[in-house]
Amino acid sequence: MAPQPCVLLKHGEIAIKGRNRGTFERHLLRNLTRAVTEVDPRVHVERRSGVAVLTTSGPIDELVERAREVIGISVVQPGVRVSKDPEDAARAAVRMLRERFGGDVRRFAIRARRRDKGFRMTSSQVAAHIGQHVCDRLGWPVDLDDPEVEVVVEVDWREIFVSVEHLRGQGGLPVGCSGHALSLLSGGYDSPVAAYRMMRRGLRCDFVHFTGAPFTGPSSTYKAYALVRRLSRFQADSRLHVVPVGKAQRALATAGAGQLQIVAQRRLFVRVADELARRLGARALITGDSLGQVSSQTLSNMATTEQASSLPMLRPLVSWDKEEIIAEARRIGTYDISVLPDEDCCSLIMPPHVATRTTTEQLSKVETRVGVDDLVSQVLSNVQVMEVEGASAPVASCEAVTR
């Protein structure tokens, strides 16, 4: 068997699952196959016990980057597969080290593992054999405690995998294995990160964005579309529901919301999202709330807002500070979109002072005056739905995908 380039993928958290492990693996295999065939239709995805293997006749660099974005994959190892012979593995290791480092001398270690426990050599013997080969051919010193280079050798049932790269994946649980939720998406840093964090716990997300139309322009919608498009790298077939609430916000102000305006708006958004989620079959709402970050996110106001929903409200960032949120936004690629200017519907009608301690009784009076049930129905009658493709697809305008 000639050495064949491949990518070895390890499942991480799924490996510790019990009887339901097969369900998680099927979700992961489906998501992985869809993701990698987007960049290379020739790729072959092979499922093994605790790992998956990608092979193709083309270059593997794009496959590696795409696989690193698949939630549920914790380790991505580009390398080669060779026949189940220690000599072939040793030659492959030397070749890979020469190609990667040229004539540079590095301290190295061989990390060997056998999935096939019946192989004629133990893991230690495999490591020693290949390590001796590297010393003889390249003159590199062995350093098992603090190596500059680690060569990973894995003896499988039919072949041996050799790799000198050990890349971090997204980890978490495969998208879809935990159910379906609706994420409230603003144009800021917080809500896209919150959606991503819940995707990592296996939730498939639909998205709802509230715009101040007709009193604001389309900039926030374009921004929300771009954010969902970026997040679609982590799940396929994302949908963005755009809800114009400018007239409803004005109705709340006219009803005398005053200092309660911001919390009244948030309760309205939650009511609308709750009903929309039910129509979509979603079982929870996701928000980017962070305790104490702004006046509407005090404990009192968060409790008052949550009581407007009949579904659970998930707040994965509730204990995160702004620096942590921004750092995660940079890592997942939403930061450069979130930093763009837009017209935020929440600041469309901003009172001079915002109440930080509210009760359901206070808000109920405002909602009774405005007729909140009818207001929710009116708002939902104007929802636009956009089908959003992943960031690897050609850019399309919002108008082209609105239906």
Image: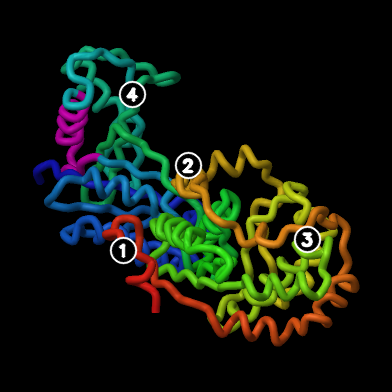
Q: Eyeballing the image, is 339 above or below 365?
A: above
Range of residues picked out in magenta? 79-97
Viewed as shown, does residue 186 lie left or right of 170?
right
* Mark carried by residue 331: 2
Residue at label 3? 302
Q: Going 36% across and 70% down the picture, which residue do you hit?
A: 399
Q: CA distance from mark 1 to mark 4?
A: 43 Å
The part of the image, by quadrant, that contains residue 380 is bottom right
Q: Position of residue 21 (x, y in %)?
A: 48, 64
Assess whether residue 118 is covered by the magenta stretch: no
Q: Earlier in the sequence, mark 2 or mark 1?
A: 2
The part of the image, by quadrant, that contains residue 284 is bottom right
Label 1 is placed on what type of residue? Ala
Residue at label 1? 396
Q: CA distance from mark 3 to mark 4?
A: 50 Å
Label 2 is placed on what type of residue? Arg
Q: How dense is the environment of label 2, judged by Cα within 10 Å: few (below 14), some, or many (20 and up)?
A: few
